[in-house]
Image (cartoon, rainbow, N blue to C red):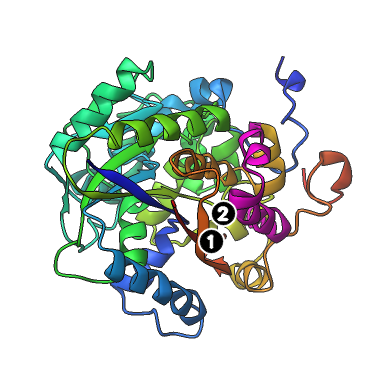
Amino acid sequence: MRQDRDYSDIPGTYVFDPHHSMQGYELNMFCMSLNNPDNRDKFREDESAYLDGFPLTPEQRQAVLTRDWLALLRLGGNIYYTFKLAIFDRRSMQYVGAAMSGVTEQEFMDMMIAGGRPAEGNRYTSEVKSNG
Amino acid sequence: MAKLFAGVGTSHVPGIGAAVDHKKTQEPYWKPLFDGYEPAREWMRREKPDVVIIVYNDHASAFSLELIPTFAMGVAGQFQPADEGYGPRQVPVVEGHPELAWHICESLIMDEFDMTMANEMPVDHGLTVPLSIMCGEPEAWPCKVIPLAVNVIQYPQPRGSRCYALGKAIRKAVESFDKDIKVAIWGTGGMSHQLQGERAGLVNEPFDTAFLNDLTADRQRLINIGHTEYMRESGSEGAELVMWLIMLGAMDEDAREIYRHYHVPASNTAAGLIILENG
């Protein structure tokens, strides 16, 4: 069914559609909980114990603990929620963007200063060689 | 009667707010962006709107996946800056205009736009960064604010055509309010950007330039842009631009462009700003 979506052929893009939202609800709500400073303290104290309070899948739990930013998206995370975990780590959106696209933070920042990633060659999965 | 005299489109990148808050606006990275905001701040000081309706999206601050209103209007007297994980921005409390906000909601619902009304709605960078862009760092914001939060995070977002129609209905609502006040509407978010995935960092300057041009040259083209075209051309987060169409709907067909500014990058985003005035 998902292959029928007309946005499924946009490369390197995880559309937060109903399918993703169902898959990622608990994961995203864990991220949401980090808006609260008391929760941030508890998570900082013992990440694993804090995660016990959320019914995540083993894959989601592992992706949180290892900060696997792409896996978090693939497992239903939404970037505005998963970025709360990056904020917790005092990481920038450039850091996360770099991690997801497989370059260093400096390379990512340089790409942005040079005008960003062009749309040319990045509109359809069929155009893209290196990315999934 | 109240008059809706102007519309502003502007990005609401959190890094812009952080640059203000951490006194970095004169650093080489940020200076060209902020220099371009100065004429807009002069316009704001000169025009002194009494009320600004700020169309923005909440980024998992007031709302989360627990509750996803498509269109939520803030009807309270005050809105507190939200804690987005760093502690709340140290910016003035946002003062609302309950009387006008309720008037607009009543008018919109009678016109078949089924609004959500919010009395408790902390406001995040989506709303406070546009205020910083347009007003700098005052002790208190110089206008009352009516927040209009639009869901653009959970697909499907409202269509551009629906946003445009809502803007038209907001214009009608404002101009049936029985007080002589000046009202502006700001559509925020965008321009092209993608925060997520292997395609993070996408910027499409030709798309953005055409979008800015067509706010006055060909609004029907903008109204017809669909979700997939936004995502493919302007990045998965570029679809925030539908919020500019709510602003556009409140503007005359022959609204005049007063000012524009465009700069890449602001963090991971192409930052745009435009000011339109009704005749």
Residue in the picture at 42% in, 64% down: B15
- Same chain, marks 2 and 1? yes
Position of B251 with respect to B48 (left or right) is right
Q: Please tell me in which quadrant of the rendered image residue A9 appears.
A: top right
Callout 2 crowding tier (Cα within 10 Å): few <14, some 14–19, many ≥20: many
Structural distance between the alpha carbons of marks 2 and 1: 6 Å
Query: Residue B23 at what x, y percent from top left?
Result: 32, 79
Position of A56 with respect to A70 (left or right) is left
What's the magenta region?
B200-227
Q: Is residue B194 visible?
A: no
Q: Please tell me in which quadrant of the rendered image residue B105 appears.
A: top left
Q: Find disc 1 in the rendering and name its residue.
A: B272
Query: Residue A36 at what x, y percent from top left?
Result: 23, 44
Q: Is residue B259 visible?
A: yes
The residue under label 2 is which amino acid type? Met
- So how many labels did they put on this image? 2
Q: Nearer the viewer, residue B50 or A13?
A: B50
The image quadrant where one finds the C terminus of chain A is top right
Q: Are marks 2 and 1 in contact (CB under 8 Å)?
A: yes
Q: Nearer the viewer, residue B51 or B233?
A: B51
The residue under label 1 is which amino acid type? Gly
Q: Is residue B58 above or below residue B194?
A: above
The image quadrant where one finds the N terminus of chain A is top right
Q: Find disc 2 in the rendering and name its residue.
A: B191
Secondary structure mostly seen in the magenta stretch: helix
Position of A121 with respect to B19 (left or right) is right
Q: Is residue A28 above or below residue B37?
A: above
Chain at tag 2:
B
Secondary structure state at the residue bearing disc 1: strand
Q: Which mark is residue B98?
A: none
